Image (cartoon, grey):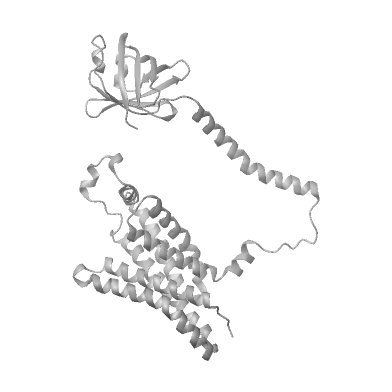
Amino acid sequence: MQQVSFFQKLLTCFLTGLVLSAVFLVLGRTLPGSWVIPEVVFGLCGLSLLLGLVYPFIWQRKGRKFPESVGAELALWQGIIRYGLAFNISIFGFKKIFGQQFIVPYFMYDEKLSALSGEWLTWHYFGFSYPFGLIVAAFQIGGSVLLLFSRTRLLGVTLLLPVLLNILFINVFYGLNPGATMQSIILSLGLLYLLLLDYRRLLQFFLPASGASGRPVLSVAFRNNGLRFLMIFIPFALTFAAYYTDARSPNIRGTYLLKSTPSSDSTNADGGLTKIYFERDGLCCFVFGTNDKENCRYTYNGKNHAISIQFEGSYNGYGNITGQAFPSEDGRSLHLVGRLAGERLDLDLSKVH
């Protein structure tokens, strides 16, 4: 006779209530608007959560009178969780196939990248490739089918959990709407619960007991562990060295707007200059007028403030820039002086970001 603790009953019933609530919510968002009565949808969600909180106490009393039914009842609740998860996740998969997700309004395509929120950036990115959406949908639908059978439940969980956790992290860290975030939290919790039902099998599979009768010789163990350490430490050292060198060197990276008119003896070529971008890795871009961009490369020495700019496009016909760039102490402005095509250049720039 299977022993089930009260905590396990409470956890199972509460998760069942959450999963059922998620099902009713996704139905409210999927069915035609004329079929949906918000009060009914939220009422069913409330009843599901109430059932999940109250029924464990009823189950506990029933278990004392009919202890032989505890195992069968536990399997029933776990089955509801499996079926609810499969129903919910497969809906999101089919929405990707039929173009009901990753939809961006036409007017959003005219917005600047810097003006987009994390949510719209996410939808733009994932909506760019329909085949990618089909692959995600295949995992969601295929994994949902596997959840419906006891023998393939674990395989379904292992397929779905990485996908759902990735979606959860995107929803949280890219600031998607609370409804989508809550859905991903509930679905991930349900899958984690199903995964833990097989934790003994997983533990034996991923961390099997060693069959060796004795310990390896100290020198062999030291050599093996030293090699393992180096496989992680060397990548860390290489990337940290590049980061540390880049972080310590003075730089003028950022976006700058022209805040004063160039001096009168400056060349006419820079008369329409409006913005300068100084990027990482020596890349920069000059913007003339509204959107006439000229790519270039620059080198900057923070010790003597020397700067050299080489244009790569048509603007190169006017010559390159050599001079000095003096950032302000607060880093919010930049004074660029030098020579352009043999004439004096004197620019005051304000930093945007």
Quadrant of the image for the C terminus?
Answer: top left
Say whether residue 344 is visible.
yes
Q: Residue at x 43, y 20 (%)?
A: 299
Residue 103: percent from left, percent from top: 27, 54
> Residue 136 location in percent, x, y?
40, 58
Question: Residue shown at 52%/33% (left/top)?
Answer: 243
**Pick the front one: 38 or 227:** 38
Q: At 33% across and 26% down in the image, what residue appears?
A: 285
Image side of residue 262 versus residue 23, left or right? left
Give the residue furthest to the left: 34
> Quadrant of residue 263 in the image?
top left
Q: Position of residue 205 (x, y in %)?
A: 62, 64
Q: Nearer the viewer, residue 159 or 348?
A: 348
Q: Quadrant of residue 293?
A: top left
Q: How many marks?
A: 0
**Residue 1 % position (x, y):** 59, 86
Picture layout, residue 250 above or below residue 266: below
Residue at (40%, 25%) from the top-left corner? 252
Left or right of 9, for residue 230: right
73 in relation to 202, above or below = below
Whether residue 82 can be seen here: no
Query: In screen coordinates, is 187 left or right of 5?
Result: left
Above-or-below relation of 137 to 297? below
